[in-house]
Amino acid sequence: MPLSNIARQHINAGACASGGDSGGACGYRSRLCLQLQGDASAPIIIADKVLLQQRAAQLGIPVPLHDYIPGAPRKPGSLNVLHVPLRRPVLAGQLDAGNSDYVLDTLRRAVQGCATGEFSGMVTAPVHKGIINDAGISFTGHTEFLAELTHTPQVVMMLAGGGMRVALATTHLPLRKVADAITQPLLEDILRILQRDLQRRFGIVRPRLFVAGLNPHAGEDGHLGREEIEVMIPVLDKLRAEGMNVSVPLPADTLFAAHRLRECDVVLTMYHDQGLPVLKHASFGAGVNITLGLPFIRTSVDHGTALELAGSGKANVGSLLEAIKVALEMASHEKTFTTETQRHGERHGQS
């Protein structure tokens, strides 16, 4: 469905686009925001309005900025901006830990809007995790921060692109800690979240879930590791007995062949670099990072801050546009799912 058609269904997405800038990185993400001008589906931009004006002038992009007013119609042909002030002035490409709280302020405002129904979801630009930590703020990424902010016990990172969806059992974790982190409760929770959100937010009635083994050759019957036998298979058997369409542990080295991907709706991999190199090879610059399990929709780009491009006008906006498109599609599916569930409940109550 075209973006403009989804937008006309009165679905808004709150984007913390410039909030991903820890100081000097603002030039890169500001340009991404500015290029959304004129798109009927453009979300509300949560950022410092003065910064956007300055960056527009620097890059020679004539963009009318309109102050966002909750409940008021958006002004066509302009960017609707929810102003959140910077803590310190910025220069493109120069990081400043003094603006770390600004980054988190934009995220908090987007979460607030999603929680109240003001926004149907949020789209985030990349953040520089290191500079936020340099400010004395413990920060491992959007996914973990949003989970903590919403008191969500378990979330799932899933990336989509290149004709596939890849979810992660563990995210930003040193490799030597991965095996111990994969437990039966964790695996069960993640698979249930995948099942629920693929149904509710992607419109897939009976999702087909492929699960990658942790060890080479999925453990080779225990000869190359016993995690598959002792941790994974009991959980997968339990969920399959409940009716979930979930695979046995599959060898990751052949799991991403084209004919296998046609047989599933998502691949759950056990760690970050098991699944994401394949997806990013197939879709870098057009992939989307999606957080499942949150009480609202959140998507993001598939790449980092690219500080070397800040203020140059050369940043590629493809992944951001795709992230907005996916967020709008998810909001549309969720609205349909909620409506159908309510109707089913009403019919059931009348019978």
Image (tube, rainbow, N blue to C red):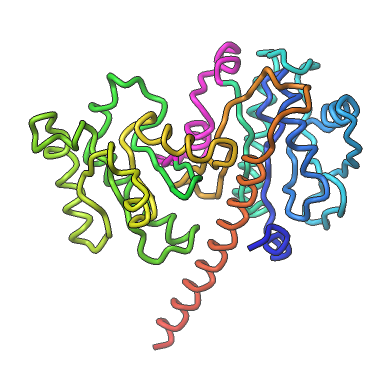
Report the residue at 81% width, 16% height from top: 89
Of 294 and 300, the residue lying toward us: 300
Q: Which residue is drawn at 47% across and 80% down?
A: 346
- Left or right: 95, with 340 as reference point: right
Question: In this view, which residue lies farthest toward the bottom?
Answer: 351
Residue drawn at x 28%, y 45% as measured from the top left: 211
- Quarter of the image for the N terminus: give it: bottom right
The answer to whether 242 is drawn above or below residue 307 in the figure is below
Q: In which quarter of the image is residue 36?
A: top right
- Work out whether 73 lies above or below 306: below
- The segment highlighted magenta reads 129-157
Residue 104 rendering spot, x and y as whole percentages: 63, 28
Q: Which of 287 and 296 is in front in this view?
A: 287
Does the magenta segment cover residue 152?
Answer: yes
Residue 221, image quadrant: top left
Task: Looking at the picture, tell me which residue is in the foreground, 108 or 3.
Answer: 3
Residue at horizontal 55%, vertical 15%? 130
Check the picture and name the quadrant holding the C terminus.
bottom left
Q: How many labels does the image show?
A: 0
Q: In this view, does 79 lie to the left or right of 198?
A: right
Q: Where residue 74 sits: x, y (%)?
A: 82, 54
Front position in the image: 253 or 157: 253
Is residue 240 covered in magenta?
A: no
